[in-house]
Amino acid sequence: MPAPRSAGILLFRERNGETEVLLIKPGGPFWRNRDAAAWMIPKGAIEAGETAAQAALREFEEETGTRLGAVPFPLATVRQAGGKHVEAFALEGDLDAAAVTSNEFEMEWPPRSGLRERFPEVVEARWMTLADARAMMLPSQLPLLDALEQKLKG
C-alpha cells in the first residue's frame, strides 16, 4: 500500500528585510503540551480527484479560515516520521495570524473511554523568521525552509 499523501502551503512574506513564514500549531491532546518541534505548515490529505495544489489550497483555507487567491508554486516533497509524504507549495502573502480560525475534528478522548471530543485542527498560527521556524518546526518539515531559501535566492 502506498504511503499516505498530503499537501500543504508554506506562506511567506518579507518583513524588515527578513523572510518570515506562517506556521501552525496543531490542536488536540497529542500536541497540547508541545511547542518546539511541533509547528508545521497547514496541510492535509489529498482527496480523490484532487491535484496536490488543489488539496493544499483547500487545506490552507480549512485550517486558517483564509482563502488564497493566487496559485502557489511547487516547493518540495518531504517524508514525515510516520511515513506520510507531504507535497509542499509556497506562496508569498500575508494574513493576520491572530485571526486564524480552524475547522475541527472529533476523536475518542480520553483514549478507550468511549467518549468523543471535538478539537480545533489548529490552535495557533504564528509568523516566524526562518531562524525561529527552524527551532520550532516539526523536524521532518525543516527541509521546506531550505527549499524556500533556495527558491528565493535563485
Image (cartoon, rainbow, N blue to C red):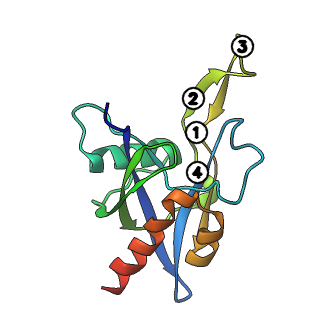
From this view, report whether residue 107 is shown above or below residue 128: above
- Quadrant for residue 37, please give it: bottom right
Q: What x and y, as percent, mark residue 16?
A: 56, 87
From this view, report whether residue 124 is shown above or below residue 151: above
Q: Which residue is mark 1?
A: 121
Q: Which residue is mark 2?
A: 105
State yes or no: discs 1 and 4 in contact (Cβ < 8 Å): no
Q: Residue drawn at (51%, 65%), measured in percent from left and top?
A: 142
Q: What x and y, as percent, mark residue 77?
A: 35, 57
Residue found at the far front of this picture: 1
Q: Which residue is mark 4?
A: 100
**First along the sequence among labels 3 and 4:** 4
Within 10 Å of disc 1 (Cα), the crowding (few <14, some 14-19, many 20+) is many
State yes or no: discs 2 and 1 in contact (Cβ < 8 Å): yes
**First along the sequence among labels 1 and 4:** 4
Q: Could you tell me how far apart the alpha carbons at marks 2 and 1 are, in whole angstroms?
A: 6 Å
Specify the label residue 115 is tagged with: 3
Which mark's residue is nearer the viewer, 3 or 2?
A: 3
SS at badge 4? loop
Which mark's residue is nearer the viewer, 1 or 4?
A: 1
Q: What x and y, as percent, mark residue 13?
A: 47, 74
SS at badge 2? strand
Q: Could you tell me how far apart the alpha carbons at marks 3 and 2 are, in whole angstroms?
A: 14 Å
Q: Residue drawn at (57%, 29%), measured in percent from left and top?
A: 105
Q: Could you tell me how far apart the alpha carbons at marks 1 and 4 are, in whole angstroms?
A: 11 Å
